[in-house]
Image (spheres, coloured by chain):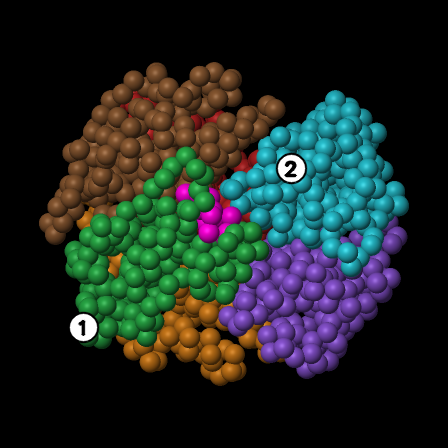
Chain colours: A brown, B green, C red, D cyan, E purple, F orange
Amino acid sequence: MSRGHGYDKYSLMIGRFQPLHKGHLEVIRQCASESDNLTIGIGSAQYSHSLENPFTAGERYLMIKNTLDDEGIGDYCIVPIEDINRYSVWVAHVTSMSPPFTYIYSNNPFTRRLFEESGYSIRESPMYNRDEYSGTEVRRRIVADESWRSLVPEAVAEVIDEIDGVGRIKDISGGN
Amino acid sequence: MSRGHGYDKYSLMIGRFQPLHKGHLEVIRQCASESDNLTIGIGSAQYSHSLENPFTAGERYLMIKNTLDDEGIGDYCIVPIEDINRYSVWVAHVTSMSPPFTYIYSNNPFTRRLFEESGYSIRESPMYNRDEYSGTEVRRRIVADESWRSLVPEAVAEVIDEIDGVGRIKDISGGN
Amino acid sequence: MSRGHGYDKYSLMIGRFQPLHKGHLEVIRQCASESDNLTIGIGSAQYSHSLENPFTAGERYLMIKNTLDDEGIGDYCIVPIEDINRYSVWVAHVTSMSPPFTYIYSNNPFTRRLFEESGYSIRESPMYNRDEYSGTEVRRRIVADESWRSLVPEAVAEVIDEIDGVGRIKDISGGN
Amino acid sequence: MSRGHGYDKYSLMIGRFQPLHKGHLEVIRQCASESDNLTIGIGSAQYSHSLENPFTAGERYLMIKNTLDDEGIGDYCIVPIEDINRYSVWVAHVTSMSPPFTYIYSNNPFTRRLFEESGYSIRESPMYNRDEYSGTEVRRRIVADESWRSLVPEAVAEVIDEIDGVGRIKDISGGN
Amino acid sequence: MSRGHGYDKYSLMIGRFQPLHKGHLEVIRQCASESDNLTIGIGSAQYSHSLENPFTAGERYLMIKNTLDDEGIGDYCIVPIEDINRYSVWVAHVTSMSPPFTYIYSNNPFTRRLFEESGYSIRESPMYNRDEYSGTEVRRRIVADESWRSLVPEAVAEVIDEIDGVGRIKDISGGN
Amino acid sequence: MSRGHGYDKYSLMIGRFQPLHKGHLEVIRQCASESDNLTIGIGSAQYSHSLENPFTAGERYLMIKNTLDDEGIGDYCIVPIEDINRYSVWVAHVTSMSPPFTYIYSNNPFTRRLFEESGYSIRESPMYNRDEYSGTEVRRRIVADESWRSLVPEAVAEVIDEIDGVGRIKDISGGN
């Protein structure tokens, strides 16, 4: 990181990371390489213990941190960001929780629109195979007792095991 | 950090860091040295732009991160934690936002009580000179145009300069 | 308006006005003509930038004000009203945000029930062609690039153009 | 009730009771007989006047109290509990609103999971005929003008009549 | 309690009960004797673990219930009521949480005003010696290690002992 | 008002107006004369029935509207704005509730700072005699039974009389 020259190459990306999968990792790796500092916002931070959002913000934080450490990626910040259910103030809220940033990575037209209306620069996120890698798919496989470990970095599986994430997701889904 | 053996030596400390000063740094240095991982919770995360809480959570995050990088301290997590104004659920809230931890550092009888009632282990925080180092004193000096830079790590002064923190604190205090 | 004789002929109507269309205008015209003062409550005021609620309360306020000015309708108040998601206090909330009123115009059995349980008088809203005029239809046509301007007063189209409402609705719908 | 020996046989059960039906009553009767004190939590306490939740917490409180008085059941507490939409703090919230309790009755895997992660003991709720008795069914019959009184204790029907609950549910459903 | 004749003699009183003292008890005894049913609202229900509000709503509930049982007072309801920080909707909120009531006991001009503006009847609360009995005084004595037990009913002291209320209040006050 | 040329001369001013006094009126008169449209934001809109904030947003709305009508001032919008207790998103919140505006009138260094950090232009508010005219003084005189009517426009006194504002303020202050 080069400091003392403003935050021109500080960037932001946001995801829910329920859980972090290999597609996310690919995106983070590339965004981090283009930035002096990359802030990774953990969205919907207050939600957990639901089928959509099984893991707490803190558990997701550790999954991301351990993975990036394993990968040797530095110069990142991880920030849990609670949903604030009024889109008109969402960008200001994200900005206040995040270290300074100049541009944001996103391919989502809605996210792009919100940040553009607030005067931020947007960059395309790198692409990855969304059919193969998705949080929804990881959670579906866990419920169905199918093989899910290959979809996530090793450090993520480690955290899920440590906190009995499989048991939690199954209980949430009403199974036993 | 040693992983795969649970989170027995994962710990937490919480402060408002308005701004991070050299007393905080001393505490962090020692707590980190005793822990496999130290989570640093930034309290009152949603507040900013007041005399008590001039800096946003994101600005405080960057102050802490840059300082710890300068000091060569690793194996920490920084987590903004919004106040939730009901003490009976505060520990559960902190726990959900933080990576797993087993004990908490605090000398405050109230904080200790809350965590004890929830079954956590508490450790005494290392001591530092509270007369010399305090956020209140840093903010007072900034308003009074007195010398404040010696109270904070260099990286903190750098961030304050970059975001015109001095101007902001003066405007908040109603001066011009 | 005749003042100094209480608020016997002060009335209220509530809508989301996403956006104001010619059916709304017809209702407002008639209600205003029967009242000393008509308060127009903009419901779900805190929501915007979604397909259901694309426009901010402020944008909707301007649409209504400019239209009523064009129509020469006076003696009205426009009040954004944030949703408060507990129906048991909703009437009290609306009442506190609105200038005093004695009766409310509504054809909706649920709204009527809530105000009746709180002791208000209800009047039937004037009818209009709901198949032709609806906010849902206006938004659908905008997304589908169909002709929508004939459904709304000229002043509404003017505001939508000025704020690039068409671009916003398309981005929200995920199109590009 | 035996006091002065801690709260080992104090227990909790939670329901929405929209309205209390004979299945609920069966469960309460058995749980109360096994406990020194049974707290009955009225969930989603802040909601009312919707098809899912037609009755206020206070109305539901009176339905339960009058029924238990009729049945001669003592040693219970009734506690309205507002939803707090973050599952990670829900148990702490319930605990703060409820008199002390040591175990909770629930057959729901999700509820059981949340309380287990917080260190509580769980007991199976007694079974009842869920096809015959359900709040959904009571509300459906009221809307459809079918016979519903046989599904609820007499004291419940009494309260519903007194507050014109039938009229309210019909208005909510949009009928007249 | 006589049922089936509406709720003409159902009444409400509200206090914080931090903790319930003998002055409160005197008031409750008299109000209950004048009412078919008395609802006792526990105000500021979400607050606890502060010097002003040391006890949770659930702990306060148990103090009240056990005391009234000891006194042989029946026909009451105890309802925790969370503060909702907008006075304009407070009466509607209280009403929704409470079983139906027709009049409220209060000597406080502000509370009386709020209920009067909403159309309720108000009755004077019975008087008691406010110099001798007050929650503030009980808490002060606990902090100061002075004798406090004579100010509260026996069942209240019992609950305070059981939950280590003395230790909690001292920790909150920062003493040890 | 000239439309169709953007909102370059649309402006905003914010006050609590508890109640509107002649100093406020002077400011509004001058700001309105310099603007194509002036939005008057009623701050702390959700508060009422306290000594600081005795009047509801709706009552304050009517005071302002009737006064401006009496004065023949047109081309204004009145918008109740609820406080959102995080300064970092306050400007975004105000912006969403208000019709579009390009500059804001304020002499308060803090308000100016917040809007400047969000990129808005600020203009000095016109001055008035703050010793003579202040809401605090009006409320103090009402409590003290001193003469207050000369401090407010006639239409304001009219509304205060109509809603028994004097009685309310006295009850709030605990007097009788």
What subunit carries mark 2? D
Which residue position holds label 2? Answer: D53
Badge 2: how crowded within 10 Å, few (<14), some, or many (20+)? Answer: many
Residue C45 horizontal side relative to residue E133, left or right:
left
Residue in the foreground of this view, choosing between A93 and B92: B92
- Above or below, C130 against D30 in this view is above
x, y percent for residue B14: 40, 56
> In the image, which disc is placed on residue B70?
none
Q: Does residue F173 appear in this view?
A: yes
Residue A36 horizontal side relative to residue A24, left or right:
left
Residue at (53% x, 40% y) in the render: D87
- Above or below, A24 against E170 in this view is above
- Above or below, A143 against A35 in this view is above
User: For the image shown, how many numbered marks are present on the structure?
Assistant: 2
Q: From mark 1 to mark 2, how far is it between C-alphas? A: 61 Å
Label pair 1/2, CB-CB below 8 angstroms: no
Split into 4 quadrants, where in the image is the C terminus of chain D? top right
Q: Is residue A6 magenta?
A: no
Which residue position holds label 1? Answer: B147
Give the magenta part as a residue range.
B90-103
What subunit carries mark 1? B
Amino acid beneath label 1 = Ser
x, y percent for residue D77: 75, 50
- State the SS at label 1: loop
Badge 1: how crowded within 10 Å, few (<14), some, or many (20+)? Answer: few
Residue at (42% x, 75% y) in the render: F136
